[in-house]
């Protein structure tokens, strides 16, 4: 029902100007992902890997979370409730952080905010392997969710600044593919590691991926926004609602 409602909203309220598209070429060629924009935009590949890495890190714990909670919780009957609460609250924290930090990210600096959020995510991911009760895990997952959520607007902005205006759809399509791949790889990595080395290894793996993402993000050179965009942002912030 939610998906149906979303489709209705798009069909009813979204208006898009028709654009000319080139005809010709095989159908297979038209649906194969176009990676050519990555070759002309420095840092884009790294940013896509960082974006996918966030999904890997967040999902390494997913398959073993109920088992981990059961192992540290004396009340096994409430495992399902606590698992849902932890997943839900961390997602809410990510959404609120993404919306809040997204509004001020251009003032703080996208690179600086991304570095802060990724570093914070690493610091709160590691202790999760050593918690002794679900409440401790809940608090850390909420903070971690906020850190991950705060990273996403900066990554998207940094991608948009490096993408050709006429190819942004292609770039963000590749970014979505990378995120989906990360969401698929994360649970597999976490499941395999936890089966072989214990539940804590899934948290260690997530922290390691976040650390690699933080290091990768630091290698991406800063791109300045055009002056016109900065002025537009300033006017938009000052304009009354």
Image: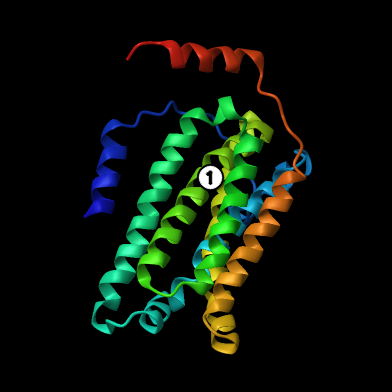
Q: Judge from the rendering whether residue 167 lies leftward or rightward of residue 241; answer left or right.
A: right
- Can you say whether 2 is above or below 162 in the image? below
- On the image, the x and y values in percent for residue 114 come to 61, 42
Q: Residue at x 62, y 30 (%)?
A: 109
Residue 147 in percent (x, y) is at 51, 49
Which of the pair 34/78 is nearer the observer? Answer: 78
Q: Is residue 65 above or below residue 16?
A: below
In the shown orientation, is residue 235 left or right of residue 81?
Answer: right
- The N terminus sits in image quarter: bottom left
SS at badge 1 = helix
The residue positioned 41% from the left and 65% from the top of the image is 136
Query: Residue visible at 54% across and 52% down?
Result: 176
Whether residue 148 can be seen here: yes
Pick whichever, 24 or 106, lies toward us: 106
| Residue designated by label 1 | 152
The answer to whether 169 is drawn above or below residue 192 in the figure is above
Q: Quadrant of residue 188?
A: bottom right
Q: Residue furthest left?
A: 1
Point out residue 238 in the picture as x, y percentages from the top left corner: 44, 11
Residue lying furthest front: 132
Residue 174 in sight in this render? no
How many labels, in total? 1
Residue 52 appears in which quarter of the rendering? bottom right
- Residue at figure coordinates x 62%, y 29% from the top left: 165
Q: How is the image coloured?
A: rainbow
Estimate how packed mark 1 is, as few (under 14), some (14 to 19) or many (20 or more) residues with alpha carbons within 10 Å. many
Whole-percent x and y of residue 64?
Answer: 45, 78
């Amino acid at each position: 029902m939610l998906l149906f409602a979303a489709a209705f909203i798009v069909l009813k309220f979204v208006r898009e100007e028709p654009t000319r598209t080139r005809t010709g070429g095989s159908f297979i060629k038209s649906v194969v992902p176009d990676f050519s924009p990555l070759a002309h935009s420095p840092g884009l590949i790294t940013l896509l890997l960082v974006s996918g890495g966030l999904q890997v890190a967040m999902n390494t714990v997913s398959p073993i979370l109920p088992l981990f909670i059961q192992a540290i919780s004396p009340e096994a009957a409430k495992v399902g409730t606590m698992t849902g609460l932890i997943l839900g609250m961390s997602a809410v924290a990510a959404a609120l952080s993404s919306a809040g930090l997204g509004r001020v990210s251009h003032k703080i600096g996208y690179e600086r905010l991304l570095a802060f959020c990724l570093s914070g995510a690493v610091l709160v991911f590691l202790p999760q392997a050593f918690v002794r009760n679900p409440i401790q895990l809940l608090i850390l997952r909420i903070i971690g969710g906020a850190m991950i959520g705060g990273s996403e607007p900066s990554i998207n902005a940094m991608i948009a600044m490096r993408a050709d205006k006429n190819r942004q759809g292609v770039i963000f399509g590749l970014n979505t593919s990378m995120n989906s791949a990360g969401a698929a790889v994360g649970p597999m990595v976490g499941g395999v590691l936890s089966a072989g080395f214990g539940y804590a290894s899934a948290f260690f793996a997530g922290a390691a991926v976040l650390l690699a993402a933080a290091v990768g993000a630091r290698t991406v050179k800063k791109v300045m926004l055009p002056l016109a965009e900065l002025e537009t942002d300033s006017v938009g912030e000052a304009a009354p609602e």
